[in-house]
Amino acid sequence: MLEKEIDLKLFQTLAVVVQSGSFESGAKKLGLTQSAVSHRIKSLEQLVGQAVLLRTTPVQATEVGERLISHVQYVSSMQIDLLQELNESASSKATKIAIGTNADSLATYLFDAISPTVIREDLLIEFVVDDQSRTNHLLRTGRVQGCITSVEKSSPGTHVEYLGVMKYLCVASAEFKRRYFPQGVKREAINNAPAAIFNQKDDLHFEYLRKFFEIEDTDFAYHFIPSSEGFLTAALNSIAYALIPEPQCSQALARKKLINLTPKKTMDVPLYWHSWERQPKRLRALSKAIIEHARRVLDPH
């Protein structure tokens, strides 16, 4: 594609700058001066003949930049695979793979999905948790090698597989229902009933209120609980009502420790697995395990 010699250090510099969010932070991580980093990025842009970065705050990769980041991450993984195949001492070292995921997938099915492959392939996994609508950004910037996301559209150089639908039920304890929703979940009662919100990026509860109760106002009572397991605990302890994945709350519902407040109103979130188009064999094995297991446990529609 390019007649000029390609220096992978330029690609790696781009990846670090995007992951760090700025030239200054990238330079510190690389142990270089900011001007040296800037020079490398300019050299890369001259090499490919177009911009690879948007000089925003934080900096963002262009579509071309995303392809280059994907390429350098792929090359790095392939080098590790090759060394492990050629060098007996290197093959005894575990391979590190970073996965972007939403907290609910991590809390429900992801460990069951990957554990046999992690053991068989001798993998070390770094889970990077973010909202399901934002985890694909982690892959685009090279922070992770694969991600679970609610975004269907693929990024340049990546491949997408449909996993299934995560169903969220609006649940609370009987005590909480008596206290805040004695007449059922109605618009006028919602403002005073404390909800569980994961963090400031969590849009699911707001979407639920807009979709089923036509509530646009975000000025209602809520707790910030940045833990999927914490949502369930908060609901069981009667301090909040929450949208919880059906697999996570099914036991508590069956034992009548929780009540489905709105049985006909569920939030259905389609999930997808995004990974590189070209994958080293260990990532390919991990991708296959996640896809196959998720399709067994998630709702297909």
Image: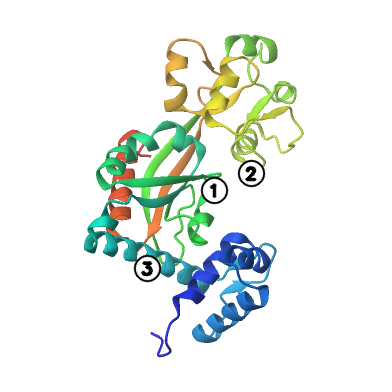
For marks 3 and 1 on the same chain, the one whose residue lies earlier in the sequence: 3
Q: SS for tag 3?
A: helix
Q: Are marks 1 and 2 in contact (CB under 8 Å)?
A: yes
> Along the line of sight, which residue is nearer the eye, 41 or 33?
33
> Along the line of sight, which residue is nearer the eye, 124 or 264?
124
Q: Mark 3, mark 1: which one is toward the viewer?
A: 3
Q: CA distance from mark 3 to mark 1?
A: 27 Å
Q: Label for residue 133?
A: 1
Amino acid type at circle 3 is Val
Q: Label for residue 75?
A: 3
Residue 116 point in image, percent of width and height: 27, 38
Q: SS for tag 2?
A: loop
For marks 3 and 2 on the same chain, the one whose residue lies earlier in the sequence: 3
Mark 2 sits on what residue?
201
Other residues around mark 3 within 10 Å, as few (<14) / some (14–19) / many (≥20): some
Q: Dividing the picture into quarters, in which one does residue 177 lie?
A: top right
* Figure check: 281 above or below 132: below
Other residues around mark 2 within 10 Å, as few (<14) / some (14–19) / many (≥20): few
Amino acid type at circle 1 is Ser
> Along the line of sight, which residue is nearer the eye, 197 or 259?
197
Q: Is residue 298 visible?
A: no
> Is residue 1 found left or right of 200 in the rendered image?
left
Q: Please, which residue is most extreme toward the bottom here?
A: 3
Residue 128 point in image, percent of width and height: 50, 46
Q: Are marks 3 and 2 in contact (CB under 8 Å)?
A: no
